[in-house]
Image (spheres, rainbow, N blue to C red):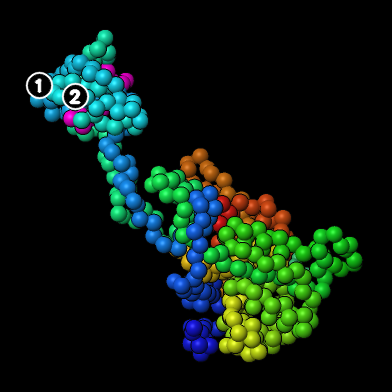
Amino acid sequence: MTTPKELFASVAQYDPNALPVEAAQDIVRQWAMPRGANTPSERVSLHDALGRVLAEDVISPIDVPAFDNSAMDGYAFAATAVTAVTGGGATVELPVAGTAFAGRPFVATSGGRECVRIMTGALMPPGCDTVVPQEQVTREGDTIRFAVTGIRAGQNRRLAGEDLAKGKPALTAGRIVRASDLGLLASLGIGEVAVRKRLVVAFFSTGDELRSIGETLSAGSVYDSNRYTLFAMLRRLGVDTLDLGIVRDDRASLETALRHATHSADIVISSGGVSVGDADFTRGLLNSLGEVAFWKIAMRPGRPLAFGRLWSGERAGAGSSALFFGLPGNPVAVMATFYFIVREALLAMSGAQRQALTALRARAAEPMKKRAGRTEFQRGIATREADGGWRVVTTGPQGSGVLSSMSEANCFIVLEHARGDIDAGDDVEIVPFDGLI
Ligand code: AMP
Ligand code: MG
């Protein structure tokens, strides 16, 4: 375990009160070490492996395909026989010796100038190495005729092991299992894989004004929406969630919640209570429970954000530890900071290989206000243009409390730290929501 002193060494070179986004991401990356190789893994069946992180390499026990087979419906023959006899001449005529179906091979030797009617996926008959597609052939009775020009020896034949070779890793540890991987594992005859135990993430909302669904809203109160967006984003990342509800704005309640969360989870996420008005008592508390790496990021939305490590014991370094993200309370800020700051830490601690977010270049279809000196994550609606490029407009007012802007948008428009106002026609970077796990 890294000592608090070492942890701070990585922060010293920055101003912890206004970190550029990239610097904050760097620090989070350094602190969010994957749980060690001794992390318990579990074996799950293929269906349950979807979205999980592979705990070890999967070595292919067989060649896939296991045998040479045809990639087309057509006729199989020996290329040498054809070219030798015709000398590359215009047309060739071959007798049809039989038929090879997928799963029903034709094994009588087809020697010399014979061919075999063959279906896609059927075993290549002995002696045959080349397939001519049926569309290129005229058949009369048991004889076919086709033009030799353009025929390549070995064409339309899938070689044994060309997809996956026996003994080679088919998938590597840290892979997040996707749809194609389930099929690939099935093609190897593998019905179970070892996956990392899911990360446990505890989260809660803070604020005296917050009410849960089902409660009546009194003057000045709002429904707690952050626990729902957080729940959804965490679920999509494949972690186990522990919803600790709403915590009142007082030191004792917050301390109890943080200790309980740290004791029960690998990562603790709170929302609210880190902006200037609340920062003081939160700051005092966090400093007594652990170390805080930074408090503010030069980003909008999302400026107040506390990140550090907490201990469940009586003092820092005692008991069990958890990474802590104190997200801002504003609903859009919660989502933006989750995607650009928290997400990568969760993946890293899950033992997953790094998954870069998909970023595209788009043309701004309207001017956008932007202040230099912070990265802005505006909500955008991107559409495809006739020339294949992307154009993007904002969803309108960019207040960090306007959650409907997230529902309306299909991407973040990421405006870099140093950049000022954007003119219509300028290139900007967009990160499509669909690329966000
Ligand atoms: P805070 O960061 O605690 O100062 O909160 C900033 C703004 O976000 C305030 O308007 C809060 O009412 C609002 N807010 C905080 N937490 C939540 C929540 N869980 N759901 C909806 N709005 C919230
Ligand atoms: Mg608050």
Is residue 385 highlighted in magenta? no
Q: Which residues are magenta?
A: 127-137
Q: Is residue 215 visible?
A: yes
Mark 1 highlights which residue? Answer: 85
The foreground one among 324 and 188 is: 188
Compared to 97, does 171 lie above or below?
below
User: Which residue sits at x=49%, y=84%?
Assistant: 2
> Which corner quadrant of the image does residue 341 belong to?
bottom right
Q: Secondary structure at mark 1?
A: helix
> Which corner quadrant of the image does residue 200 belong to?
bottom right
Circle number at residue 110: 2
Count neighbours of disc 2 (C-alpha within 10 A) and say few if under 14, some if 14 to 19, many if 20 or more.
many
The quadrant the C terminus occupies is: bottom right
Report the side of 339 relative to 119 (left or right): right
Q: Closer to the observer: label 1 or label 2?
A: 2
Contact? badges 1 and 2 (CB < 8 Å): no
Compared to 145, does 258 lie above or below?
below
Q: Earlier in the sequence, mark 1 or mark 2?
A: 1
User: Which residue sits at x=66%, y=63%?
Assistant: 230
Of the residues shown, which amino acid type is indicated by label 1? Val
* Percent of width and height locating residue 31: 51, 77
